[in-house]
Amino acid sequence: MDIGFIGLGNMGQSMAANLIGAGHRVTVYNRTAGKAEALVQRGATAARTVAEACRAEVVFTMLADDRAVEAVALGPDGIAASLPAGATHVSSSTISVALSERLAAAHAEAGQRYASAPVFGRPEAASAAKLFVIAACAPGVLQPLQPLFDAIGQRTFVVSEHPHTANLVKLSGNFLLASAIETISEAVALVSKAGVDRQQYVDILTSTLFAAPAYQTYGGLIARQEFEPAGFAASLGLKDVRLVLAAGEQLQVPLPVASLLRDRFLTLVATGGGHLDWSALATLAARDAGDSDHSA
Amino acid sequence: MDIGFIGLGNMGQSMAANLIGAGHRVTVYNRTAGKAEALVQRGATAARTVAEACRAEVVFTMLADDRAVEAVALGPDGIAASLPAGATHVSSSTISVALSERLAAAHAEAGQRYASAPVFGRPEAASAAKLFVIAACAPGVLQPLQPLFDAIGQRTFVVSEHPHTANLVKLSGNFLLASAIETISEAVALVSKAGVDRQQYVDILTSTLFAAPAYQTYGGLIARQEFEPAGFAASLGLKDVRLVLAAGEQLQVPLPVASLLRDRFLTLVATGGGHLDWSALATLAARDAGDSDHSA
Amino acid sequence: MDIGFIGLGNMGQSMAANLIGAGHRVTVYNRTAGKAEALVQRGATAARTVAEACRAEVVFTMLADDRAVEAVALGPDGIAASLPAGATHVSSSTISVALSERLAAAHAEAGQRYASAPVFGRPEAASAAKLFVIAACAPGVLQPLQPLFDAIGQRTFVVSEHPHTANLVKLSGNFLLASAIETISEAVALVSKAGVDRQQYVDILTSTLFAAPAYQTYGGLIARQEFEPAGFAASLGLKDVRLVLAAGEQLQVPLPVASLLRDRFLTLVATGGGHLDWSALATLAARDAGDSDHSA
Amino acid sequence: MDIGFIGLGNMGQSMAANLIGAGHRVTVYNRTAGKAEALVQRGATAARTVAEACRAEVVFTMLADDRAVEAVALGPDGIAASLPAGATHVSSSTISVALSERLAAAHAEAGQRYASAPVFGRPEAASAAKLFVIAACAPGVLQPLQPLFDAIGQRTFVVSEHPHTANLVKLSGNFLLASAIETISEAVALVSKAGVDRQQYVDILTSTLFAAPAYQTYGGLIARQEFEPAGFAASLGLKDVRLVLAAGEQLQVPLPVASLLRDRFLTLVATGGGHLDWSALATLAARDAGDSDHSA
């Protein structure tokens, strides 16, 4: 299939590479051109503009935030303006529910198809084609996409016919991750002040009730106080919590733990930690416990 | 070894049975006598008083709360008054850090030994000898206990030489469970108001980032709205959150998520849900979202 | 002076009337025309369009929310497009800091002047010319406005040369009011469950430490459970808390009590109370205490 | 009347002096003897023991906390053991609801009378006999006490026949004060980061909606960052919030703002600010906003 791929960060690079590996003709585009080179060597074509990447049956976007997606998809010479009628825009970025609704409307108006397909998984999983794809789109739109999702992930969950619902599910997942980070941080602050070894404590949790990837990954970072370089920056954590709260407000669903997380991330950012990994919330729990050793 | 076992609820029954199965001579005691029968048929001796159960090298207690342990251990004719010098009291109940400190002092004064060994695991794990034992005691006290812990659990974690630290770790574990319940509840309230199927949503979580026993157990209960009969009652959840907050106050460690949980459990109890499973926190998240269908 | 006045709700009516009373020539405009009649009888001229109301040295706006102000000020044929160069737009609405910044930029670009002058006080105070004016603008802009502020209020506080700062101060005042409402509500839920008479309790507070208008007004409403008709609707309370949180996020200032208030207002709105007075937060405190008598 | 007065801190000194001034025979007792001297010069008799101070028709206690009151009232040779049958213990200390209930029971058993009469007002008000007395006792107990309350305060509010209810009202008042401190702190952090002068801001609040003693006192301290010496220490603030939460738990009334305050006070204490005035909560709001200038 002819595929365009826009957004070649850590995640996008691997996803595009796996689409090439599955035998598709992939045209790649990134605002910073250098990122395309490795993929070109694997057989991709480099586009010089978004419009060039849109000469395809399917165009993926995997970008940092609402602003980037809005510019690429809805701006002049953007996807909505360039993609052929009947072709599909697959949005895999973590964006707001509201923007996803606007994308759906814009593509419908332009006679294009639109699917929302954010993913769960870190760069390692993207590289290994082990992502989990959270897909939402009309049934007829989904079918031709399934082989593409199979090329990048280990499993696809179709959660709704309404694309923005997949964005909601993705944001709720990031909310749950941030919640796990905060609660592990509080528990570690508590037991380590009583002399328990942080690493042993996290080992106990992740050998027993919390033997889950999320707790293993973030528990480990917190135990080792390994907040740089960021796998996912606190400033992005703040953004995602803001988006999940906005979705909650639109749906009229209060989310008290998300409110608490928002204040924590905001504190972290305001005190100079926006560039740290979002697991650096742990420095706040330690700081508030007067544990000057372990604070940032 | 000659072992006394006091407290024959769901958990205690299975633990005592596994000690018998490992070849020990076990004398059992429960305030309500009927509970001892099944164990007597397996070879246990029934004690008529706490003092009788204390004619042993090691006496376990597995009771509901501080009040029960205080009465049995520190009351007249209790363990501290009855246990031979040099014998060991192993406290496996989920009790406060403060009471554990008082037990340590009382047993030291009486020339007895004391170990704290609360467990992670539900009744099924106790029955299958698959508990996780969180142990804390002086090194010399631990060694002879290890075969007993091996008889009831799949693994022992020794977290400190100070017994009360094991209680802190256990309480922190319950705090993390309650936090997971609350955050799953909020996420489910959010996505289900957008039309996502609760069961599918929980399946997604527990197949991906949150493939952990805690999320599987409580996510399932929340998806199915299966809050009766309680595996662990909301009123006990409130008690454990209170104990973890008290420990945090003693150690001067603020625990904002625990504070939020306290208010949620208190709301659940005040509005008539104290007897429900603690996962019924989900009814509050649904209620506050105006989701009258799913509220208690 | 020739003055335009746009927005003739409860507050705007009285403010415009007091400007007429002070001898100014006032042209009034409201989207719903009927509202102008009473003012015309007092000597005002009715404008049929925003542009007509802008044939003035100063044009006031006193509108419900950002959307209304944006439409009137920045829309086609709006104030920025119509007001003569050198004339001043005085924005008295409770709007976001961000919109106030956009207004400042738009008026600067059009060669117009801009002052932000939100007010503290309820409709009775507006009618009695007893408002408090929170003003922010360049010094040269302020001077000719002072007599106008004197005509509508008892005192003017100039808080900054940057207009949007006055909006921030106004929003922070509404945050403090909402906080007082929530904390009175919690305290009343507590003591009334112990049998203390609500009205007597509020009398005690407002005769002693809290002898302030805010506590008298809202304490009284809460004691009498008098939530309809709304003096200020819960849905507007939610809006203002959202705006203060947005301002906090822009300035990187966490506001944990505001976060809590957001969840409370959202709960009130989601459960059908958006039209009630914002003091109906008290129904949530009562409900969560299981006090079915006093809940909405 | 023959009156005993136990507890001669800032508040107690002034209250005892005013009782002497009203013509009563007052026997005073303080654990640290020196405190009695000034009162002896005004005509008081110094007691060497609690029991001596109990040779009276009425004995007041005005002590720091539960522990002090428990020791003086319920200890060996304490009030319950020493006061003549029919005489009255008036407890004016800020103590827990639970202790007040125990005092009521102990005095009833000893054939004594008991009234709870905590006060609102700072040392200046005590000195000027301008306190507000929050009284609760059986009607027959109250009547002979009224002239005594008139001697120390400007007004008496009788809130219940159940003495502990007065303690609840007093604690709820301290909760409201702490809430005002926290919300002013957050608002000041917000507007001062936007360049508004703190003192001017507090002047605006206290000239308008919040023209109340509580806002004037604490707003002023926060604006001037005047946290030492403490008028009321943060560690006592933590204690009172703990007591109001305990009362809320007993009555099953969630108090989310009190929970938040508990974490804030605990943070302040854990980071070395327990000795500061409780208005030093403002340093946390400033610190979390990254405002290093204004943090402790």
Image (cartoon, coloured by chain):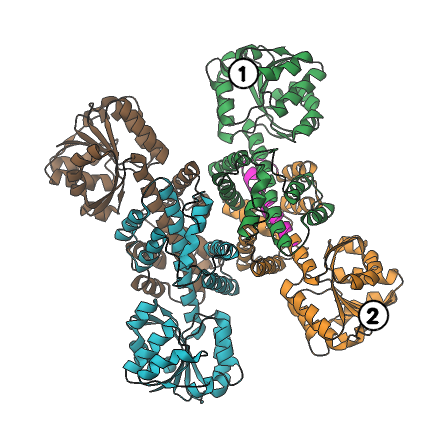
Chain colours: A cyan, B brown, C orange, D green
Instruction: Identify the residue at image location x=61%, y=37%.
Output: C197
Image x and y of residue A156, in percent:
32, 73
Q: Give whichever of B258, A189 is nearer the camera.
A: A189
The magenta stretch spans which residues? C174-197
Q: Amino acid at mark 1?
A: Gln
Q: Give whichever of C245, A294 is nearer the camera.
A: A294
Separation of residues labelled 1 and 2 (CA atoms): 78 Å
The residue to which callout 2 is attached is C57
Image x and y of residue C160, in percent:
71, 57
Task: Give yes or no for contact between labels 1 and 2 (Cβ–Cβ under 8 Å).
Answer: no
Q: Amino acid at mark 2?
A: Glu
Which element type, helix, strand or loop, lies under badge 2? loop
User: Quick check: B126 left or right of C34?
Assistant: left
Magenta region includes residue C182: yes
The residue to which callout 1 is attached is D112
Disc 1 chain ID: D
Magenta region includes residue D289: no
Disc 2 chain ID: C
Image x and y of residue B78, in percent:
27, 24
How many tags in the picture? Answer: 2
